[in-house]
Protein backbone atom coordinates (compact mmCIF):
# COMPACT_ATOMS: atom_id res chain seq x y z
CA UNK A 1 0.00 0.00 0.00
CA UNK A 2 1.15 3.53 -0.68
CA UNK A 3 2.43 5.65 2.21
CA UNK A 4 1.06 9.06 3.13
CA UNK A 5 1.98 11.84 5.57
CA UNK A 6 -0.79 12.96 7.94
CA UNK A 7 -1.54 16.69 7.70
CA UNK A 8 -3.87 16.43 10.71
CA UNK A 9 -4.40 14.00 13.59
CA UNK A 10 -5.94 10.77 12.28
CA UNK A 11 -7.36 7.64 13.85
CA UNK A 12 -6.17 4.67 11.79
CA UNK A 13 -6.75 1.04 12.82
CA UNK A 14 -7.35 2.10 16.42
CA UNK A 15 -4.15 4.15 16.66
CA UNK A 16 -3.70 7.90 16.61
CA UNK A 17 -1.44 9.17 13.82
CA UNK A 18 0.01 12.56 14.71
CA UNK A 19 0.53 15.40 12.25
CA UNK A 20 3.61 14.59 10.17
CA UNK A 21 3.31 10.87 10.89
CA UNK A 22 3.48 8.29 8.15
CA UNK A 23 0.53 5.99 7.46
CA UNK A 24 -0.19 3.32 4.83
CA UNK A 25 -3.53 3.79 3.09
CA UNK A 26 -5.28 2.54 0.00
CA UNK A 27 -5.86 5.03 -2.78
CA UNK A 28 -9.57 5.09 -1.91
CA UNK A 29 -8.89 5.85 1.77
CA UNK A 30 -6.54 8.68 0.82
CA UNK A 31 -9.12 10.15 -1.56
CA UNK A 32 -11.76 10.13 1.22
CA UNK A 33 -9.37 11.91 3.60
CA UNK A 34 -8.61 14.56 0.98
CA UNK A 35 -6.19 17.25 2.16
CA UNK A 36 -5.72 15.56 5.54
CA UNK A 37 -2.99 13.41 3.94
CA UNK A 38 -0.22 13.95 1.39
CA UNK A 39 1.55 11.23 -0.58
CA UNK A 40 5.11 10.40 0.45
CA UNK A 41 7.54 11.24 -2.30
CA UNK A 42 9.94 8.32 -2.32
CA UNK A 43 13.48 9.15 -3.30
CA UNK A 44 14.87 7.07 -6.15
CA UNK A 45 16.81 4.13 -4.82
CA UNK A 46 20.53 4.38 -5.41
CA UNK A 47 22.42 1.30 -6.38
CA UNK A 48 25.37 0.55 -4.14
CA UNK A 49 28.71 1.25 -5.79
CA UNK A 50 30.72 -1.84 -6.44
CA UNK A 51 34.38 -2.07 -5.54
CA UNK A 52 35.18 -2.39 -9.26
CA UNK A 53 34.12 1.24 -9.83
CA UNK A 54 36.94 2.57 -7.63
Image (cartoon, grey):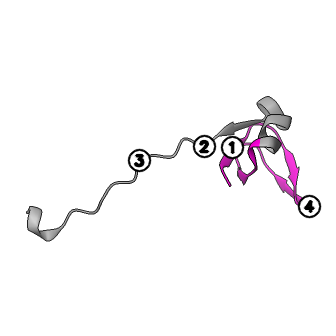
The answer to whether 19 appears left or right of 15 in the picture is: left
Of the numbered discs 4 and 1, the one sitting upstream in the chain is 1
**Cα–Cα gap, marks 1 and 3:** 18 Å
- Secondary structure of residue under mark 3: loop
- Determine the residue positioned at 85% across, 36% down: 32
- Secondary structure of residue under mark 1: strand
The answer to whether 29 appears left or right of 52 in the picture is: right
Q: Which residue was labeled with disc 1?
A: 5
- Determine the residue positioned at 68% across, 45% down: 4
Q: Is residue 13 above or below residue 27?
A: below
- Determine the residue positioned at 68% across, 55% down: 1
Residue 15 versus residue 13: which sits nearer the camera? 13
Q: Which residue was labeled with disc 4?
A: 14
Residue 44, numbered label: 3
Q: Is residue 54 magenta?
A: no
Q: Which residue was labeled with disc 2?
A: 40
Task: Tell me the quarter of the picture where residue 41 sits.
Answer: top right
**Cα–Cα gap, marks 2 and 3:** 12 Å
The picture places residue 8, in percent across and down from the top left corner, at 81, 38
The stretch of residues the image draws in magenta is 1-27
Structural crowding at the residue carrying mark 4, measured as other residues with C-alpha within 10 Å and reported as few (<14), some (14–19) or many (≥20): few
* Contact, mark 2 vs mark 3 (Cβ under 8 Å): no
Residue 19 versus residue 6: which sits nearer the camera? 6
Label 4 or label 3, whichever lies nearer to me, is 3
Of the numbered discs 1 and 2, the one sitting upstream in the chain is 1
- Secondary structure of residue under mark 2: loop
Q: How many marks?
A: 4
* Contact, mark 1 vs mark 2 (Cβ under 8 Å): yes
Structural crowding at the residue carrying mark 3, measured as other residues with C-alpha within 10 Å and reported as few (<14), some (14–19) or many (≥20): few
Amino acid sequence: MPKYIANAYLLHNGSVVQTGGEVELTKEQAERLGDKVSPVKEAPKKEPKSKKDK
